[in-house]
Amino acid sequence: PNHYAIRYKVACFVYLVLLGNLVFAYYSHAQISVDRVLVYFEAGGRPVQNVIVRNGGADALGVEIEPEIVEMPGTSDEKRVPTELLLASPKRISLPAGGERTVRLLLNKQATDQDLVFRVKLSPKLEGFGSEKDKSSSTQETKIKVITTVGLLVFGYPPKPEPKLIWTRTDNEVLFRNEGNTYVFLDQGKICDKAETKCESVVGTRLYSGNQWSVKVPRDKKVFFRQQSFK
């Protein structure tokens, strides 16, 4: 019965009060941001790009920067491996509340046949963070921090980047294949009736070189995407 549940909850509350172990949790968010999440290196161009990292939180943060090369991107066998082909300088920064710092990315190897794809993790580390206890009472205050890691997607373009999007249609599906040497990004997707008077949105994707992707499209409908590639 409900009245037993109510009495049980009240009894538990009184028990905690008598023990003097009330715990109050305070939530805050360790927030970092960057001025861009996509970074491009053109073949034969300057091998250095700068990214501005900002601390939008109320506490000082350390941020670790970890470049990884993406092997077989966009496939079920995708792997991210620490690399020396893309370097970050410095590898760790300290940001005061509201502060910002420039991180330099250096590409150590030019792409040849197809895009080189990297991910860069920017992981905030709390400095001087922990639980605090009010010495004037038996109440313990616990701070809970939510930490968010920011990521960059970095491309090193080949000398002649050429996207080549191929598509084939069956009764209820459209298959897209990227047979070029650079990525293709499909967005602003929509599936419409033949008169294009009724449409519904559909999420797109990024197709790296050699990737394929399918979308369900009823036989009596059309599908549209905006295609973007090489900057």
Image (cartoon, helix red, strand yellow):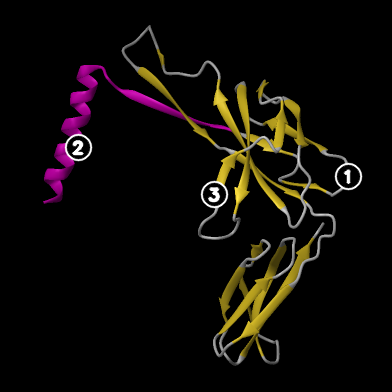
Measured Cα–Cα span from mark 2 to mark 1 = 67 Å
Q: Is residue 131 left or right of residue 213?
A: left
180 versus 108 height, above or below: below
**Residue nearer the viewer, 2 or 97:** 97
**In this figure, which residue is indicated by the disc labeled 1?**
45
Q: Which residues are magenta?
A: 1-30
Residue 115 position within the rendered picture, expressed as x and y whole percent measured from the top left: 73, 54
Residue type (three-letter) at the residue carrying disc 1: Gly
Looking at the rendered structure, the secondary structure element under dot 2 is helix
- Going from the N terminus, do you reach mark 3 or mark 2 first? 2
The residue mark sitting in front, 2 or 1, is 1
**Magenta residue check for 14:** yes
Residue 35 position within the rendered picture, expressed as x and y whole percent measured from the top left: 76, 40
Q: Quadrant of the C terminus?
A: bottom right
Any part of residue 58 in sight: no
Neighbourhood count class around disc 2 (C-alpha, 10 Å): few under 14, some 14–19, many 20 upward? few
**In this figure, which residue is indicated by the disc labeled 3?**
79
